[in-house]
Amino acid sequence: MSVYEEKNKCCGCSACVMICPKQCISMQLDDEGFLYPLIDKSLCVNCLLCQKVCPVLKKRDKKNNPNCYIAFSRNKNIRKKSSSGGLFTELAKQQIEKGAYVYGAGFDENFEVIHKGGSSVELLEELRGSKYVQSRMDDKYQEIKEILDKGGSVYFSGAPCQVSGLYSYLRGRPEKLITQDFICHGVPSPLVWKKYLATFGNVKKVEFRNKKYGWHYFALHIESDKKNYYKRLDEDFYLKLFLDNTTLRPICYDCPIKKQGSMADITLADCWSLNHMTDRVTDTDKGLSLVLANTLCGEKCLEELEKRGDVFKTKVDSQKAVSSQLALKKSASYNSKRNLFFDRLKNEEFSTLMNEWFRVSLKEKFRIKYVYIKTKIRFALKVK
């Protein structure tokens, strides 16, 4: 057996596993909880398809001169349940109504994050919302290829590296495939998520971006038999680890996909820098999406949604929109305490790590509370 050792050059998309004609590659967890390909050399015929299909090893010209929009769903319930403006739900629903299959990140029975697909609008309840864990792809590229080969249509939502891996696996851009990615901060360790979730007992529901405290101060919501938990992004242990880049996959600190540009038809993001781009939209703290139409196909999908009255959208200057999104081109900064964290994760009780890793002074707690209250007052005055 031979495992892929250059961990800073593997995004974990699993394209190599699915392309292998001898099925001699499997994805195996390392001690940080990330999946990497394991090759059975006794079965390998050295066809090199695994290397040819790898989106990291593939070199392509940087592209993208997208049309950019600020948008949100006119359906208040969809917008409320969504991480930002509800555009994923509207786009996916649009394609399901046309008979397409939709694939995106959801939870399994243990609340591990996996990619799943289907053709029912009810599925969108599971796929809606950000999932701050790297999703497991399993054999979904193969499923999608089978649907496309039979003349079906697919709407695929995933991280930029997963979209790139899908196109590489398919060896082209099928006409009946529409893809959508998001501006990616980086993908956190599934192992850290698993250990964190275990502290809640029997979990019944998870929302990474609940808007109980507003869109700007989104909260992690976990419902379990022990408690009904809501903590803002500046309070929750798991979200703080994600936002300070402690638990990301090694390749995320020098992401090759960011350097090459998105291959998706549509890219979605939170529109935090509204005032920088336009005065035609008011931020009411309910969630706004920044939408990048990277292809003519993506542009047509958005035009149709607007004509149907499902979404509000307004065009903004592309240069201003792109410059407002540092994570679009810049990789996450490496956290110097990352190795220390994973060393402690291996050797200590998770509860100990939770209690000791972030030590917040009373002064800092007051500062966080002050900023939160000030923000809430500002949006309350805007609404009035």
Image: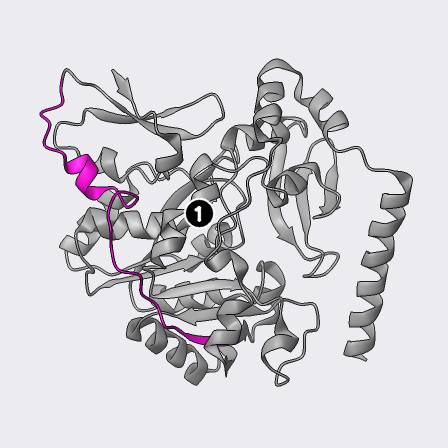
Q: Main secondary structure of the magenta part?
A: loop
> The residue under label 1 is which amino acid type?
Ala
- 229 in the magenta segment: no
In this view, the residue in front, 152 or 363, is: 363
Q: Position of residue 335 (x, y in %)?
A: 59, 37
Q: Is residue 52 left or right of residue 291?
A: left
Q: Is residue 304 left or right of residue 284?
A: left
What residue is rendered at 86% in x and 51% in y?
367
Instruction: Look at the image and tell me in which quarter the N terminus lies.
Output: top left
- 65 in the magenta segment: yes
Can residue 87 be seen at all in this image of the molecule?
Answer: yes
What residue is rendered at 53% in x and 63% in y?
325
Q: Is residue 136 left or right of residue 322?
A: left
What residue is rendered at 39% in x and 44% in y?
115
Residue 247, above or below 67: above
Q: Secondary structure at mark 1?
A: strand
In this view, the residue in front, 214 or 35, is: 35
The quadrant in which residue 217 appears is bottom right
Q: Position of residue 341 (x, y in %)?
A: 62, 26
Q: Which residue is mark 1?
A: 105
| Residue interval drawn in magenta | 43-70
In this view, the residue in front, 235 or 308, is: 235
